[in-house]
Structures are given as C-alpha cells and as structure tokens.
Amino acid sequence: MGHAVMTHTQNQPTTHLANLPATTQNTFTQFMEQADNAGTNDEYRTAMTCAALTAGIPLPTGGEIALCACPNCWDCDQIFNANHPDAHSFGESTGYNLGRIQCPLCTDRHYATDEQ
C-alpha cells in the first residue's frame, strides 16, 4: 500500500482561471482590476472579496488572493492566497495595488527574480 505525499500547499484553497467559464473569468478579471485600481482600503477589500467569491474559493485570512504572475511560464493561471508562505513576490508592481506574485508551485519550479 503506497503513501500519498501531502504538502501544506494542497490544503490551501486555489483554482485555475482556465477552469472557470469564460463569463466568470471576465468577471474575476474585472474584480481584480478594481482591486488593483482601488483608491481606498474598503474598495480594495470589497473587490478582493468579490474576486474570491467569483473564483469559488474562500477569501484567505489575510484577505488577499492573487493570479500567478510567473514570468517563466505565463500560463499557470493559478488563483491562490497572495500571502501564502511559499508564494514569491518579485519585481515592481508599477504603481498599482497588486504585486507580482508567483504561486507556490511556480516558485518551487522556477523562482523568479526582479530582472525577469
């Protein structure tokens, strides 16, 4: 009898953008853009909550989700807890609210640097 290997990343609520219907993908993207451009903390939190609900995942305790911005694969499309301990923030956010963050799997597979 084999044993399954479990990591703590499997216990985190995630989904892939591509797994959502096209209209849901568009709505999710709109909420993430609202969060990115929010002028107040309340607007940001509301947009994050709506984005998580649209993606079908619970809002993490830290109140932030992210869409993987991996510069090495560009097609990961993992939606995950932005404050996950194994996620990796890199590069400049170009003056908006959302940072550039790799999901834990991409961080493990191909760690991004600021130069990418």
Image (cartoon, rainbow, N blue to C red):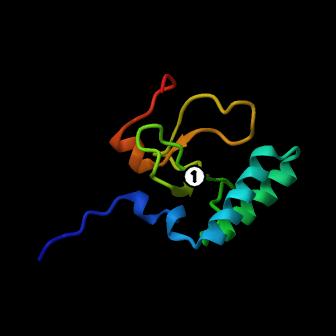
What x and y, as percent, mark residue 69?
53, 43
What x and y, as percent, mark residue 83?
58, 48
Residue in the foreground of this view, choosing between 32 and 74: 74
Residue at image coords 85%, 53% = 43
Say left or right for 46 vs 17: right
Residue at image coords 65%, 70% = 24
Residue in the foreground of this view, choosing between 74 and 105: 74
Q: Is residue 115 above or below residue 103?
A: above
Q: Is residue 14 visible?
A: no
Instruction: Quickly name the residue at label 1.
Output: 67
Residue positioned most to the left:
1
- Kindly state the secondary structure of the residue where label 1 is placed: strand
**What amino acid is labelled 1 in the image?**
Leu
Q: Residue 7 occupies which quadrant of the picture?
A: bottom left
What x and y, as percent, mark residue 21?
58, 73
Residue at image coords 52%, 65% = 13
How packed mark 1 is, by other alpha carbons closer than 10 Å (few <14, some 14-19, many 20 or more), is many
Say left or right for 110 vs 115: left
Residue positioned most to the top:
115
